[in-house]
Image (spheres, helix red, strand yellow):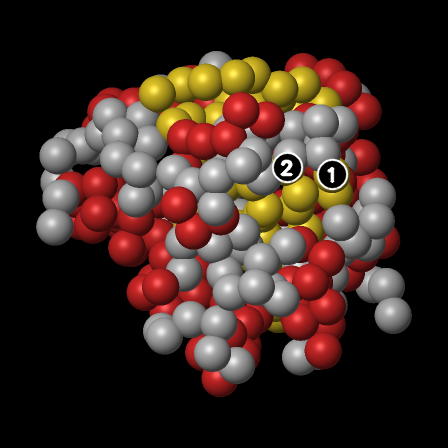
Amino acid sequence: MTTLDTVLAGLMRRYQERVPDVGRITAAMVANGLIRGPEAIENDHIAFRTLGVPQLGIASLERIFLHYGYTRRDRYSFAAKKLNAHWYSPPRPDLPRIFISELCVGDLSAEAQGIITSYTAEVPCDPVDAIELDDGAQVDAFLHRSLWRLPTWAAYRRLAEESEYAAWVIFNRYYLNHYTITVHNLPAGYNTIPEFNAFLEAHGIKLNAAGGKVKVSPDGKLLQSSTVAEMIAVTFADGTTQRIAGSYVEFAERRPLDEFANIPTNQLRREQRREGFEAGNADKIFESTYREQTERA
């Protein structure tokens, strides 16, 4: 097992513990013969959320994955949500892509900026500088360590009024925001997003309806959907216990590029399908942790 494999395994282990939908979905897929076991699931990508302050944000977190051979690709901007993002292609085709987003903290109100920096100031320099990147266990521990003190309920609530993304990160830090099940290589009848969504809902899985349950890129070749984030009971620094949004599961269908459209589905290679991401799709996927979705009946 490589150092990168150790890091990815650690991320997935803790993520599955926090997101019961992962086990529910996997069990349903096995029970219905879609896969032999969990190891047969193809992970399209994993995603992280960060805060765009000088010593943190994308510039800091990406260093870990660039060290392991990931390549920075397209940049995306989400003006209304005050977010930027990059995606990263993996060094091996069996590994997931990575999507890292960051909040443009300087675009928030002075009050919200002050709340955020009161926590992030506890990280005086880039924390990746202190990690031995060739030590998988050390990197795994870092990605699940609190970088700043536990927030108060008042701070969390105030940030959520202005940016639900900001509130999510101030509590959850670098916990894996989601992983993504590849749909297009599943058996016929389940290998499109509309069909797989129907399968999920038949098993009681609640889907993010922002922008419609199926998010489609303008070229029609990238289809995505996601669950609504798990609500987790947490205790804030002031002793207040509340249920807040944790992480969720995403699903992706990448259709063949035009020049490979006539190749049988079971013979298509990864590079012959639609690559990258789509800002319009991602914009709505972000809302899997937003109250409009988590509180929807």
Q: Is residue 174 above or below residue 131?
A: below
Name the residue nearer the viewer: 129 or 113: 129
Counting from the top left corner in percent of width and height, residue 13 is at 34, 62
Q: Given the current orientation, which residue lies at the most extreme bottom position? A: 31
Q: Tell me the residue at 80%/35% (across/down).
A: 162
Question: In the displayed structure, does residue 10 sit left or right of residue 50?
Answer: left
Tag 1 or tag 2, which sits nearer the N-term?
1
- Which residue is under mark 2? 222
Counting from the top left corner in percent of width and height, residue 126 is at 35, 22
Mark 2 neighbour density, 10 Å: few (under 14) some (14–19) many (20 or more)? many
* Type of amino acid under label 1: Val
Q: Secondary structure at mark 2?
A: strand
Q: Is residue 187 visible?
A: yes
Mark 1 neighbour density, 10 Å: few (under 14) some (14–19) many (20 or more)? some
Name the residue nearer the viewer: 184 or 68: 184
Cα separation, mark 2 vs mark 1, equals: 6 Å
The image quarter in which residue 2 lies: top left
* Type of amino acid under label 2: Leu
Where the C terminus falls, by quadrant?
Answer: bottom right
Marks 2,1: beta carbons within 8 A: yes
Q: Is residue 241 visible?
A: no
- Which residue is under mark 1? 216
Question: In the displayed structure, does residue 180 sit left or right of residue 127?
Answer: right
Q: Tell me the residue at 22%/47% (across/down).
A: 5
Question: In the displayed structure, does residue 174 sit left or right of residue 233?
Answer: left
The image quarter in which residue 51 lies: top right
The image quarter in which residue 190 lies: bottom right
Q: Tell me the residue at 35%/21% (across/down).
A: 71
